[in-house]
Amino acid sequence: MLRSLYTGVSGMKNLQTKMDVVSNNIANVNTVGFKASRVMFQDVMSQTTAPAARPANDLGGTNPRQVGLGVQIGSIDTIHTTGARQATGRDLDFYLDGPGYFIVKDGSDKNLYTRDGIFTRDSDGTIVNSAGMKVQGRQLGATPEDGDMSLLENFPTPLHDLSVPSRLENAAGEPILDDDGNEQTYQSMAIDRNGIVTAKYGNANYVLGKVAVATFNNPDGLEKQGGNNYDRTDNTGDPIIGGSGENGAGMLVSGSIEMSNVDLANEFTEMIVASRAYQANSRSITTSDEMLQELINLKR
């Protein structure tokens, strides 16, 4: 009798976890680059009241008799499908049209991974995300747009902070002058679909670097860190660093961001299922309680 009470409790407890996950998905329906999660259940080990028996003594075999002991969480998975594209018209907003993650460095010099491509250029010229984390990639010296781009083909380890300084300088920190002897100061910048960072100084365009994109053998193993960021784990494998369109990564689309991949219709359906299952489990507890009360009342 008591087994049914604890079985109902296990159902209610784990269905509450499912509701927590569903509620979090719904809360993040408008979060840029958010990936929905799902809860998968497993049964708990069953109690065997009689084992299976093989045919013998002119009798056929019998199957085992088992009583289940409830439910448990099998997994809480993150669904890494690509969200829909939302146009913003802003030059430093980026959408990855396939797998891959931008790499940003936090204040402790740790690399994190994100699908949130809302970038900006800070007062020092560094390309950062909305939290001030520095976007990582291949940083070059000022290379004329028609110069040798072979240095962009291989990504070094470690990566570098991408920067678009306010003026062009040589290795000694001295300003690079144009043909008229004037300093070449920053005018504008752009990042193309291949992640190549270009900037206009004076009347000339220069290539300054390339945005890095990371892919993983097992992206489902990434761990959410908050702030639209993920961290690698022992089950993701090492990040595979390249550019957009490399190693299976998607291409960059400027002027767009990635919307959440939460499907509201599915989440509301899951909410209804979880709610009804929770009610059914609570009913099994009250029914077991009524049966215990009847047993107690046998002796009045």
Image (cartoon, grey):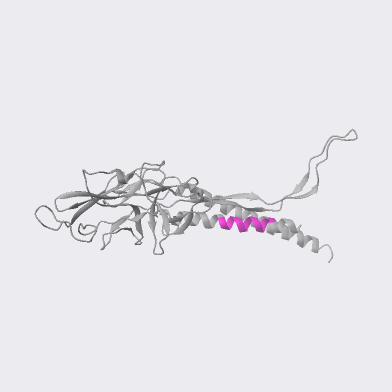
Question: x and y percent of residue 108 in the render?
Answer: 41, 64
Asked whether residue 6 is drawn in magenta, I would say no
For the image, the number of numbered tags is 0
Over which residues does the magenta segment extend?
7-17
**As rendered, which of 90 and 59 lies closer to the eye?**
90
Q: Quadrant of residue 159?
A: bottom left
Provide the major secondary structure of the magenta segment: helix
Which quadrant holds residue 8?
bottom right
Q: Nearer the viewer, residue 21 or 142?
A: 142
Instruction: Using the rendered image of the protein, determine whether residue 294 is visible from the camera's viewpoint.
Output: yes
Residue 78 visible, this angle:
no
Where is residue 89 shown, x and y percent of the image?
Answer: 26, 49
Considering every residue shown, the one lying at the far left of the view is 180
Residue 154, quarter of the rendered image = top left
Direction from residue 222 to residue 55 in the image, left or right: right
| Residue that appears at 78% across and 60% down | 294
**From the image, which quarter does the C terminus lie in?**
bottom right
Q: Quadrant of the N terminus?
A: bottom right
Position of residue 167 measured from the top left corner of the image (x, y, whole percent): 20, 58
Q: Name, please, the residue furthest toward the top.
A: 58
Residue positioned most to the bottom: 300
| Image side of residue 177 versus residue 137, left or right | left
Question: In the current view of this chain or complex, which residue is farthest to the front?
Answer: 172
Relative horizontal placement of residue 64, taking residue 163 as reference (left or right): right
178 displayed left or right of 268: left
Q: Residue at x 27, y 44 (%)?
A: 149
Residue 144: x %, y % from top left: 21, 47
